[in-house]
Amino acid sequence: MVMQTSKHSSKSPRNRGFYVKMKLLPTSTFIYRYFKWFLWFFLSFYFFISFHITHKPPSLSKTTFLHHPYLKTTSRALIESLKKTTQYPKTIVPKVYIYNLPSKFNKDWLTNPRCSNHLFASEVAIHKALLDNNDVRTLDYREADFFFVPVYVACNFSTSNGFPAIGHARQLVHEAVEIISSEFGFWNWSNGADHIFVASHDYGACFHAMEDRAKADGIPEFMKNSIILQTFGVEHYHPCQDVENVVVPPYIPPESVRRTLEKSPIDGRRDIFAFFRGKMEVHPKNISGRFYSKKVRTVIWEKYGGDRRFYLKRKRFGGYQSEIVRSKFCLCPLGWAPWSPRLVESVVLGCVPVIIADGIRLPFSSTVPWAEISLTVAERDVDKLGPILEHVMRTNLTSIQRKLRDPDVRKALLFNDPMIQGDATWHVLQALSMKKSYKKWRVLSE
Ligand SMILES: *[C@@H]1O[C@H](CO)[C@@H](O)[C@H](O)[C@H]1NC(C)=O
Ligand SMILES: *[C@@H]1O[C@H](CO)[C@@H](O)[C@H](O)[C@H]1NC(C)=O
Ligand SMILES: *[C@@H]1O[C@H](CO)[C@@H](O)[C@H](O)[C@H]1NC(C)=O
Ligand SMILES: *[C@@H]1O[C@H](CO)[C@@H](O)[C@H](O)[C@H]1NC(C)=O
């Protein structure tokens, strides 16, 4: 610059003024002199950053801490929030604080290996998946959107019949709430509203296997303000789901499914027309005015027990998944409660589930197109199963089977450890992020 001014002497008066100003403002001398360069630098920096924000979200995720699949979606969500969008980013992952309760509430039950594998074991699976995921789990309560209370209530198996004995469940959960509400402040802040429990047994947080008793007992007062993850779900009003809840699939160990698929026939031939294995009472008992399966299973046995198209078995058999994988239609009639683990096993093993449970509310219906991958038969039409299934086989069975092969659908119904994007735990988190109590979203929307 000095060289240039000396060459063009006509500009010297301006230059003098320049120097005068510089003397008057000694502190800003440097900035003033290189103002153009600063401006250029800031503009370039601004364009560089905004280009990267709008065009390259994955490169941002690299600069943060992990190469985890969730990270891409998390950083994208962050970017969306920077852009002050009013649209809710669908794939945001909430932060969960997990209470470290004494082992009698959870780990001690695992001494029985069945505890983490039976059909109610989502209470264990979700806890483990959250513990093992550093993107979701937070140790800093200030960062938490939700608080997870890990109590395993369905692992107390009765010695007489082997079924979970949940008589102690209320007391156990109550004790846990006493501990967390007295030792930590988080419960009192929201009166439990951002707290999550799993109640995977038949009538959710009513904690009783018999519907009448469950209804009469109701959901304990101390859980009514919280969010319950439950397998129980019906479309109509029911006191046992009269609480913020997310319907989750019953637990089927992913390894068992993998093993079955490995051993299944390579040609994928399904030689069984319609399959059901399970309890079918010929003379169901009247238990305080109710009959098991509302007699639906009895009708199935009476009507189709002798029908060669139907493969119906009443005995327990550990290898029943190998029968599902050989079947075109798998019957999923209600038991005491509407849901059944067969729903999950049928879908993941490619057998079209035939749902016979009026008013059932199915898990993750925003992702899993239940109407396209299953058949629903009304309880009163169960005696017409034969013609209904024959009709579907002639018309649209192949199109249903094709939709059933969608890996996203199968993935959504299994709990994995570690959690994978699109699996059951991931869907639970998605459902939670849609809840009112999701603080981050509340802040963004204000
Ligand atoms: C297990 O369940 C039974 C029956 O409900 C109950 O008596 C017992 O106290 C429970 N065990 C524990 C450790 O809570
Ligand atoms: C939360 O409220 C209960 C009941 O009012 C009280 O007994 C308890 O001490 C409170 N907890 C904390 C951590 O302040
Ligand atoms: C079943 O038992 C209840 C009493 O527990 C009785 O009121 C009802 O009439 C019985 N129902 C049938 C169909 O027998
Ligand atoms: C298949 O056909 C049945 C009977 O006509 C119908 O109820 C069902 O909706 C159809 N399903 C699909 C996925 O097209």
Image (spheres, grey):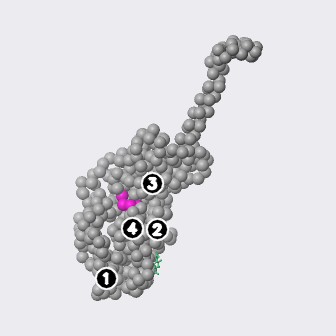
Q: Residue at x 44, y 46 (%)?
A: 71
Q: Is residue 265 above or below residue 224?
A: below
Q: In this view, does 393 lie above or below 59?
A: below
Q: Mark 4 points at which residue?
A: 405
- Which is in the foreground here, disc 3 or disc 2? 2
Q: Residue at x 50, y 45 (%)?
A: 57
Q: Are marks 1 and 3 in contact (CB under 8 Å)?
A: no
Q: Residue at x 46, y 72 (%)?
A: 372
- Which is in the foreground here, disc 1 or disc 3? 1
Q: Mark 3 points at which residue?
A: 429
Amino acid under disc 2? Pro
Q: Is residue 140 above or below residue 417?
A: above
**Mark 3 surroundings within 10 Å by alpha-carbon count, few (fewer than 14), some (14 through 19), many (20 or more):** many
Region rendered in magenta: 411-415
Measured Cα–Cα span from mark 4 to mark 2: 12 Å
Q: How far from the left and from the top, in percent, is residue 76? A: 51, 47
Q: In this view, does 275 lie above or below 209?
A: below
Amino acid under disc 4? Arg
Q: Mark 1 points at which residue?
A: 310
Q: Which of the image's four quarters has the N terminus?
A: top right
Q: Between disc 2 and disc 1, whose residue precedes?
A: 1
Q: Is residue 197 visible?
A: no
Q: Between disc 3 and disc 2, whose residue precedes?
A: 2
Q: How far from the left and from the top, in percent, is residue 369? A: 46, 68
Measured Cα–Cα span from mark 3 to mark 2: 19 Å
- Which is in the foreground here, disc 3 or disc 4? 4
Q: Between disc 4 and disc 2, whose residue precedes?
A: 2
Q: Mark 2 points at which residue?
A: 369
**Mark 4 surroundings within 10 Å by alpha-carbon count, few (fewer than 14), some (14 through 19), many (20 or more):** some
Q: How far from the left and from the top, in percent, is residue 34? A: 63, 21
Q: Which residue is drawn at 56% across and 47% down?
A: 80
Q: Between disc 1 and disc 3, whose residue precedes?
A: 1
